[in-house]
Image (spheres, grey):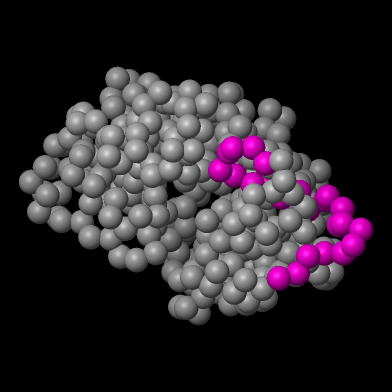
Amino acid sequence: MRAFVLTGPRAYAVLDVEAPTAAAGEVVVDVERVGVCGTDVEFFTGEMAYLHSGDARYPMRLGHEWCGTVASVGAGVDRAWVGRRVMGDTMLGCGACRRCRRGHQHVCEQREEVGIRGDRPGALAEQVAVPVTSLHVLPAGVDPVAGALVEPGGNALRAARAAALRPGDRVLVLGPGAIGLLVAMFARASGAEVHLMGRRQASLDYAATLGFEHVWLPDDLPDLPFDAVVEASFAPHLPALALEVVEPAGRVVYIGLAGTPSLVDTRTLALKDVTAVGILSASPGLDATIEAYATGVVDPRPMVAATVGLDGVGPVLAGQRPPGAGPGPKVHVDPRLPAPAAGADEG
């Protein structure tokens, strides 16, 4: 099968590799759609922390935001799975440790992460093999575009829920990227008044096209009481700003990860009686996200600016917008798209 292989920092190729076979307890999925995200870009540049800790290494196959159809099953797996449309949890715990037994496999110390951590290849290929226990069935109302947005949506849903919003509450989302916009969508669905702050006018203008009226550049942020603040950026100074602008007795949710340490004054946290929550992983929010998409409570599909084949992944990771791309922050990959006649690009 064809697969996108990252061979080193900024080095890649689309290769013919051996198709996966389903081991015991696994399935093989025909991949329909894959999302490209900031984590993939960090692997492309070589900045991803797992590369330096030894939890990941080149060559590797990226792709953790995916959906597809089960093509085959391994020993011990019900054949009724064949033909089902599914997406999969990124976090694969060992299943035996205390954290896994308590339902927290997404923070298992020995976990694999599909396309990210360990030796589990990702979905930027025509097929991917994953444990059947990681699968979540997609109903007919969730098309491939929405299906590949379940994983980021699960992160966002968890962040919005951690903000404990009630109808009429005012929430500020810092960082109008893909996760920030999804957080804003789930927050709006809860009845909250949503504000977004970003550093690029183009991103704010795009957020406005999604129906968000309150969008601000940093210098224009109004002095309003924010009942909750969700920090969804990559900026190391914004976690402190979140704590500064949240109302006393409010909630701050940290889901963004900066490339360098962020400083938060815990004296302010205590003196304002603020609840601070950190969010890692979509795992506990996947089923609720699928339901929200299926029922139309949240429609994430307008965020996808373009869909490319495997041969278009490298330029996207390098920061190039695909020809004809819309203004949204997300690019999807359809591994079934044919290769260009001239052959695959290589970096």
Which quadrant of the view contains residue 347?
bottom right
Question: At which x and y percent is residue 97?
Answer: 45, 67
- Does 322 sit left or right of 221 as displayed? right
- Does 135 sit left or right of 71 as displayed? left
What is the magenta range? 325-347
Looking at the image, can residue 154 be seen?
no
The majority secondary structure of the magenta stretch comes to loop
Give the camera-side residue of 209 and 281: 209
Question: At which x and y percent is residue 69?
Answer: 77, 46
Question: At which x and y percent is residue 158?
Answer: 42, 42
- Quadrant in which the N terminus appears: bottom right
User: Please, is residue 347 above or below residue 134 in the view?
Assistant: below
Q: Residue at x 53, y 36 (%)?
A: 289
Give the camera-side residue of 247 and 157: 247
Give the camera-side residue of 28 and 218: 218
> Residue 229 colored magenta?
no
In this view, which residue lies farthest toward the left? 271
User: Please, is residue 88 above or below residue 18 in the view?
Assistant: above
> Residue 340 colored magenta?
yes
Question: At which x and y percent is residue 217?
Answer: 34, 38
